[in-house]
């Protein structure tokens, strides 16, 4: 569904992404993990059109969108959340979702009902009339997720959705992600909560120094010595530069 | 050839170098404190007047007066302003920051007017009057040489300071990474103070040096130094060498323009138009992605007023207005009617700035266009076609201004609109082809089909109804689909992009609609006074308008009503009070500085409890400097 | 206030610990991110604070360096209560904090960066340059170069030169290995060990747990804003892997 092919990005001399390949399939939650500064957010920005790659291609459902802007990609069914929150702070929680729904053509009561449904899905229906600015971080992330879902994306990219959530909330989020995949969505998850990643993802890509160092099922990735080295350091191989 | 040389010398020595001084001051204050100082010109003007006072009135030798003003008084003033007022604004929204320095600008003018009666002519003799040299056939006065020398010296001293001294290096370090600077043991706040001290000092030098070349006039001096904005923009508010170059280029352009271009009807005041055109061009060609000032500022939005509540309040207000229309004494209406008309114009700011997040400093220019159209099309009978023309013309011009402005954000948009407003002042409002030889146009009150509203009392009620209708309309707009989208765009352009929201159309619509409201207000304002003159729409009043709007709560319609009435009552105050002169501006300046501590204004539904909570919360909030964002994450700036 | 008057303070004659945190709580907005954090670091000790992302390690360092005010609890540096002291004052008193990924001023030259280190009281420019250039001759060759144009490793050396030349009572290092190749990380940690040998107290926050544990005398693991475990590197080491890469035991997987 989403395919990233040989994408490279450098910021003045520093290679942030080096020939990265990723496939995100419909009906699955795909994980993207890696230590801090590995290039995950940069990759998100390349996929969603905020960052132009120096090389490589981004394909959504087989269509090359490498040179399309974020808006066009959104219309092709690409949704995302942000690591640094991008909620509409001066609107209410419900209005945040309504902006997206109304942009998709829903009006009036239909939009409101759909909005409440979405909020219920992420567990925010009781805060519908709260101003979004005062939400704690965790709930604000869920709001971003609900808002992204309002656009009925075919591929959704989540940048650390669980940070700020407690154990039960994050378990609920995990179930929601699996459900979304089950409904035919392709989910790409960047996450630091390894329990969550290992539980919900069918495939995991590990990024280190802008390169994919490991791909596979959770169990394979977890025992991969290269991954251990990337995360824990030490004398083992890691990425050669 | 000799004319060319003479113009070149005048361009460099009279204007260019003075602009360089003040523009470098602007850059220094901006880089160290992050605040663009609109009052830079007023501060230079005050410096020049102080110098005049000491040297001409008290008979001090000029070197002593110069030293005291430039090296002691102005640096202290700058440091004091930074410490008392501006330091609190570090995390405030752009409009609050602009408001405070605009208030300083107005306050500076008001204080100067109160102390130094503008009707008295004053001159400052040039340094070494009578001495001159001839270089290659061009005569240079010693004073001109001193101007060139002073600006070159200032450039060199600043360069040495920033690159050779530890405080200078620390100042650059603060710009680079404020937090790390603190971690090395250098106190970042001290360097903003230092920056303001230097900035004020530099603008005083500029003011004193230029004062002998032109008359010592409060407005002239203030505005002249405003031209430094354009030069500072060439340096993108960062680079001192580029700023210097920009200043010299601007000085030359101005000099050649005045010397070679025919004094045409359209450009009767080239000296003022050229710097503003220059500023506009510089802002528009400036690469926005790098110069973007996107910052995350948390603004607590006021409570959304529901439909029923807005209708109830509107009806109540109209009721009160009708009672007032019958009871107020006849003399009050000239002020009351102007006040309500101004309030209507201010509603355009609620839409554009309050909801749309775009700061405009040219709303009175649109109002002036509205009054112009009403006068020309409405005729003496006040045909409703005139109102249509007023709305249409201002909306059309608004759309034209908005097209380039759509790329701009924050400070750059504000400065572009300021340039537009000043250009309109010079080329349109003060043009005898527009306003006639008497520089006055009569504007009729609209002629309604069923009921006449031309008497003062009825016009008052009519204005109140129009205000209420627009206010209720705006509140409805705020609650609508369009309103949600408008606020969403203001809050997070990046998120709007990922949701596929079309931002260009919305922004254009907001700007155009806002200009239309201002135009309508202007037409009605003209009717209130039955005639308008260029003095009704100078750009400086647009600044006052924004200031009052922010002070009374730019996101609230009630605030605009109060703001408009206060604005109008101000002239009542001035008419009855001879001492101090310009008392109203003094009050406004002081009030705005005070009220800006609460950026949402008194009607924003922000209780003291809530402010206190915010303040407590802020203690632990993470820093939102862009410095810590890796390049790939700078979405807000890239996406704007 | 000194540690001697503290009821819980060590009654031993020896000097108070270089750093002691007592019941620290801290919050962003209204969300508490540190819950009752306690730890102490002695002079000459390298203390490694480990844990997954978002556990509160960096926040702990922000509190210690004065960049963030705790909502409760106290920070003692060399026995003195410094809770709420501004970062610049703390820095002048000898708390040297190298923040995550950016311990240098990118738009200042190497020499200008070194000049900034002299804000720690009583230091002269020549002292800083001497110490730094003797230790890192590569920086001497690049003294006129902008720090931002140095390689990642060189930047980190420049950042560490502050620790070397300012002789801090307490050194705080936040993820100094971030974005660096393993070889350079190893080099950096040798440097950390040698700085510790000079008797400074060092608090290291690190994601590369194994690397940090190699030089640490003591370590703690933090998750969800709490210190879960504290002990010697040998005690902590085996537990870390699970914490980072998650346990899939919950799903009943057979891999473990």
Image (cartoon, helix red, strand yellow):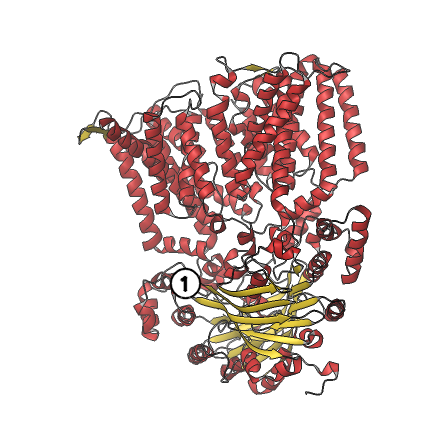
Q: Is residue A118 above or below residue A38?
A: above
- Quadrant in the rendering for residue B21: top left
Q: Position of residue A168 (x, y in %)?
A: 76, 70
Q: Is residue B69 visible?
A: no
The residue sitting at 45% across, 59% down in the picture is: B181
Q: Viewed as shown, does residue A51 lie left or right of C142? A: right
Q: Position of residue B503 (x, y in %)?
A: 62, 46
The residue sitting at 32% across, 49% down in the picture is: B159
Q: Is residue C240 above or below residue B251?
A: below
> For mark 1, what is the residue?
C148
**Count of marks, rendered view:** 1
Q: Nearer the viewer, residue B438 or B121?
A: B438
- Quadrant in the rendering for residue B466: top right
Q: Viewed as shown, does residue B165 lie left or right of A118? A: left
Q: Is residue B536 visible?
A: yes
Q: Secondary structure at mark 1?
A: helix
Q: Position of residue C233 (x, y in %)?
A: 56, 84
- Quadrant in the rendering for residue B605: top right
**Chain containing the residue with disc 1:** C
Q: Viewed as shown, does residue B43 lie left or right of B401? A: left
């Amino acid at each position: 569904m989403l395919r990233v092919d040989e994408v490279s990005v450098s910021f003045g001399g520093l290679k942030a992404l080096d020939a990265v390949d990723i496939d995100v399939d419909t009906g699955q939650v795909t994980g993207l993990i890696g230590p801090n500064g590995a290039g995950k957010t940069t990759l998100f920005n390349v996929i969603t059109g905020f960052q132009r790659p120096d090389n490589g291609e981004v394909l959504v459902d087989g269509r090359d969108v490498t040179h399309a802007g974020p808006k066009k990609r959104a219309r092709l069914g690409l949704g995302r959340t942000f690591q640094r929150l991008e909620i509409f702070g001066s609107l209410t929680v419900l209005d945040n979702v309504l902006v997206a729904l109304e942009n998709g053509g829903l009006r009036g009561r239909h939009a409101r009902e759909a909005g409440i449904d979405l909020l219920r899905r992420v567990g925010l229906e009781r805060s519908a009339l709260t101003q979004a600015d005062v939400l704690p971080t965790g709930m604000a992330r869920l709001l971003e997720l609900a808002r992204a879902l309002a656009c009925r994306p075919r591929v959704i990219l989540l940048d650390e959705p669980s940070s700020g959530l407690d154990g039960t909330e994050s378990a609920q989020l995990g179930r929601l992600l699996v459900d979304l995949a089950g409904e035919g969505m392709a989910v790409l998850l960047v996450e630091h909560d390894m329990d969550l990643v290992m539980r919900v993802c069918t495939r995991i890509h590990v990024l280190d120094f802008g390169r994919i160092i490991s791909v596979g099922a959770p169990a394979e990735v977890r025992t991969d010595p290269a991954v251990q080295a990337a995360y824990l350091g030490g004398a083992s191989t890691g990425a050669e530069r | 050839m000799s004319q060319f040389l003479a113009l070149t010398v005048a361009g460099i020595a009279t204007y260019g170098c003075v602009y360089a001084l003040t523009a470098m001051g602007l850059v220094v204050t901006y880089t160290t404190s992050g605040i663009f100082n609109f009052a830079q010109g007023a501060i230079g003007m005050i410096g020049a007047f102080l110098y005049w006072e000491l040297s001409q009135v008290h008979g001090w030798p000029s070197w002593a007066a110069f030293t005291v003003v430039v090296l002691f008084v102005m640096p202290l003033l700058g440091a004091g302003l930074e410490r008392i007022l501006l330091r609190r604004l570090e995390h405030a929204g752009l409009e609050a920051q602009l408001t405070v320095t605009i208030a300083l600008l107005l306050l500076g003018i008001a204080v100067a007017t109160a102390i130094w009666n503008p009707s008295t002519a004053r001159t400052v003799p040039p340094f070494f009057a009578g001495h001159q040299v001839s270089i290659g056939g061009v005569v240079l006065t010693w004073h001109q040489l001193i101007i060139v020398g002073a600006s070159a010296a200032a450039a060199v001293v600043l360069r040495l300071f920033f690159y050779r001294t530890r405080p200078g290096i620390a100042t650059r370090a603060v710009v680079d990474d404020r937090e790390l600077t603190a971690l090395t043991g250098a106190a970042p706040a001290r360097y903003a103070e230092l920056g303001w001290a230097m900035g004020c000092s530099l603008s005083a030098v500029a003011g004193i040096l230029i004062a002998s070349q032109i008359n010592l006039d409060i407005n002239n001096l203030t505005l002249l130094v405003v031209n430094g904005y354009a030069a500072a923009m060439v340096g993108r508010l960062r680079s001192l060498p580029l700023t210097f170059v920009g200043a010299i280029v601007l000085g030359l352009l101005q000099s050649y323009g005045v010397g070679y271009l025919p004094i045409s009807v359209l450009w009767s005041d080239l000296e003022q138009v050229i710097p503003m055109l220059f500023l506009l061009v510089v802002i528009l060609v400036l690469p926005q992605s790098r110069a973007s000032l996107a910052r995350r500022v948390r603004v607590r939005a006021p409570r959304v007023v529901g439909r029923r509540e807005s209708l109830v309040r509107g009806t109540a207000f109209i009721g009160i207005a009708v009672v007032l229309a019958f009871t107020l004494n006849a003399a009050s209406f000239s002020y009351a009617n102007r006040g309500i008309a101004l309030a209507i114009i201010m509603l355009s700011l609620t839409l554009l700035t309050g909801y749309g997040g775009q700061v405009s400093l040219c709303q009175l220019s649109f109002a002036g266009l509205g009054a112009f159209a009403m006068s020309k099309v409405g005729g003496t009978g006040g045909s409703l076609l005139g109102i249509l023309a007023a709305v249409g013309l201002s909306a059309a011009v608004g759309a034209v201004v908005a097209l380039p402005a759509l790329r701009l954000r924050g400070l750059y948009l504000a400065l572009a609109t300021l340039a537009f407003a000043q250009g309109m002042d010079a080329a349109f409002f003060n043009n005898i082809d527009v306003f006639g030889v008497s520089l006055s146009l009569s504007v009729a009150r609209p002629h309604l089909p069923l009921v006449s509203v031309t008497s003062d009392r009825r016009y008052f009620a009519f204005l109140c109804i129009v205000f209420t209708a627009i206010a209720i309309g705006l509140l409805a707009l705020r609650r609508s689909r369009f309103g949600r989208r408008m606020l969403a765009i203001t809050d997070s352009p990046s998120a709007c992009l990922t949701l596929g929201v079309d931002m260009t159309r919305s922004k254009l619509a907001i700007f155009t609609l806002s200009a239309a409201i201002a135009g309508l207000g202007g037409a009605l304002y003209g009717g209130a006074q039955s005639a308008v003159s260029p003095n009704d729409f100078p750009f400086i009043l647009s600044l006052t308008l924004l200031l009052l709007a922010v002070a009374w709560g730019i996101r609230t319609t009630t605030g605009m009503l109060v703001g408009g009435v206060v604005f109008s009552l101000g002239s009542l105050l001035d008419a009855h009070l001879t001492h101090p002169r310009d008392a109203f501006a003094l009050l406004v300046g002081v009030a705005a500085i005070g009220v800006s501590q609460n950026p949402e204004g008194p009607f924003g539904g922000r209780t003291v409890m809530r402010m206190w909570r915010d303040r407590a919360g802020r203690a632990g909030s993470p820093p939102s400097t862009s410095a810590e964002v890796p390049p790939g994450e700078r979405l807000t700036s890239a996406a704007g | 206030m000194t540690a001697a008057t503290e009821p819980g303070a060590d009654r031993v004659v020896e000097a108070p610990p270089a750093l002691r945190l007592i019941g620290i709580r801290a919050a962003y907005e209204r969300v508490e991110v540190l819950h009752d954090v306690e730890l102490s670091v002695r002079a000459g000790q390298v203390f490694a604070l480990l844990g997954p992302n978002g556990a509160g390690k960096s926040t702990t360092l922000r509190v210690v360096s004065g960049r963030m005010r705790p909502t409760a609890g106290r920070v003692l540096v060399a026995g003195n209560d410094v809770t709420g002291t501004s970062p610049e004052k703390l820095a002048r008193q000898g708390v040297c904090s190298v923040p995550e990924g950016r311990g240098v001023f990118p738009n200042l030259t190497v020499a200008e960066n070194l000049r900034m280190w002299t804000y720690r009281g009583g230091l002269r420019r020549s002292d800083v340059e001497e110490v730094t250039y003797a230790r890192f001759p590569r920086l001497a060759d690049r003294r006129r170069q902008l720090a931002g144009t140095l390689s990642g490793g060189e930047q980190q050396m420049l950042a560490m030169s502050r620790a070397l030349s300012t002789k801090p009572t307490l050194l705080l290092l936040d993820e100094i290995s971030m974005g660096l190749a393993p070889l350079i990380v190893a080099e950096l940690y040798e440097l950390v060990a040698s700085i510790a040998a000079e008797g400074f107290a060092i608090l290291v926050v690190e994601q590369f747990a194994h690397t940090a544990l190699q030089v640490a005398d003591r370590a703690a693991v933090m998750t969800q804003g709490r210190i879960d475990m504290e002990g010697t590197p040998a005690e902590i080491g085996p537990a870390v892997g699970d914490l980072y890469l998650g346990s899939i035991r919950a799903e009943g997987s057979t891999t473990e």
